[in-house]
Image: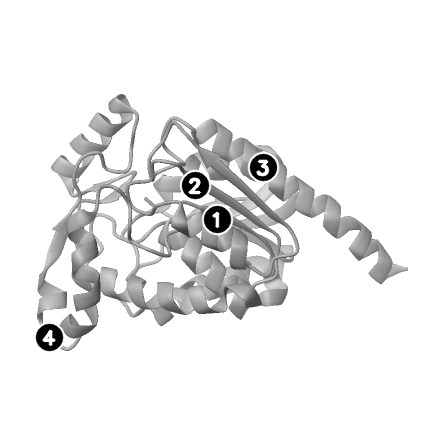
Amino acid sequence: MQDIFLIGHRPPVLLLHGLRGNPLEIQLLAQRLHRAGHTVSVPYLSGYGQRPGDCAPVLPWQQWESLASERLAALVADHGPAAVGGLCIGADLALRLARRDERSVSGLLLISTTLFYDGWNLPWFRRLLPLLPLAHPTPLRHRYRLREKDPYGIKNVRIREWIARQMESTGNSAAGARDLPLSAIYEAYRMMRRIRASLPDITQPALILHAAEDEMASLRTPNLLAGRLGSSRIEKIIFTNSYHMLTLDNDREGVTQACVAFVDALERQQQPAAAQLLA
């Protein structure tokens, strides 16, 4: 579960894993983008992600953003402006980078973006959200953990069983960690509110990919993104044969194809602009 860094000859892509997740969640997408010629960076962010042997405490969301921004700056310094994407809260972080590091971000790959925890598998979870600010000053948010449960974000039964075995044996999997600390949810909740308020200020082209049956975040999120982003170009695709973990589930091939096509289009769009600057 180390960082993934693949050198190519075409514009770079930064991909961010989900909350308490790891780079394996988006490894297939990274490989397909690299096969198309792109330099791809998928960093593991300690204090935000989770992998065996990492005992780092959950960091405040502002530090998640700072860690991701540092990785973006290093990538851009060597390879130029990057398309930035992510899965779930990783997509939220991509939106934050687009606002914070505007000139470094050429476009957005927003996969299973979560700006509301309101999916069909979370009725009990939704009731906790109004209480999270009250839990902030107490030890509760550091001690309480929510355990992942079936279907683990996966509609494909075979892949779901594989993920369940990984979680049971190691506490981690290609779909993320088995346990989610309340403190991590609290920080994500705070970041979501900030992102929702800033959507009109985000102007980069955006690709929005979401599952119709996402059990973590309903179609309210992609609809909000499509309606409120200030992006110059927005594409939205809703997949019908997967749950939350789009990069691992039945529609993973469609997801990778859409991302490769979108990044290729970004490159074609940037070439005339670069030629004008050199003229």
Which badge, 3 or 2, comes first in the chain's sequence?
2
As displayed, is residue 12 above or below residue 241? below
Quadrant, the C terminus: bottom right
As displayed, is residue 151 above or below residue 171? above
Asked if residue 8 shows in the view, the reply is no
The residue tagged 3 is 260
As displayed, is residue 175 above or below residue 57? above
Label 1 sits on what residue type?
A: Leu
Closest to the observer, 274 or 184: 184
Q: Residue at x 24, y 65 (%)?
A: 186
Label 2 sits on what residue type?
A: His
Q: Residues within 10 Å of mark 3 (few under 14, many from 20)?
A: many
Q: Residue at x 28, y 66 (%)?
A: 187
Frontmost of labels 3 and 4 is 4
Residue 123 screen position, x and y as percent: 18, 48
As displayed, is residue 170 above or below residue 277? above
**Label 1, label 2: how many angstroms apart (C-alpha)?**
8 Å
Q: Which mark is residue 210?
A: 2
For the residues labelled 3 and 2, say whether their Cβ atoms are less than 8 Å apart: no
Q: Residue at x 59, y 66 (%)?
A: 102
Q: Which mark is residue 110?
A: 1
Residue 127 screen position, x and y as percent: 17, 57
For the residues labelled 3 and 4, say whether their Cβ atoms are less than 8 Å apart: no
The residue tagged 4 is 138
Q: Secondary structure at mark 3?
A: helix
Figure quadrant of residue 260: top right
For the residues labelled 1 and 2, say whether their Cβ atoms are less than 8 Å apart: no
**Label 1, label 3: how many angstroms apart (C-alpha)?**
13 Å
Q: Residues within 10 Å of mark 1 (few under 14, many from 20)?
A: many
Which badge, 4 or 1, comes first in the chain's sequence?
1
Frontmost of labels 2 and 4 is 2
Furthest toward the bottom, the residue is 137
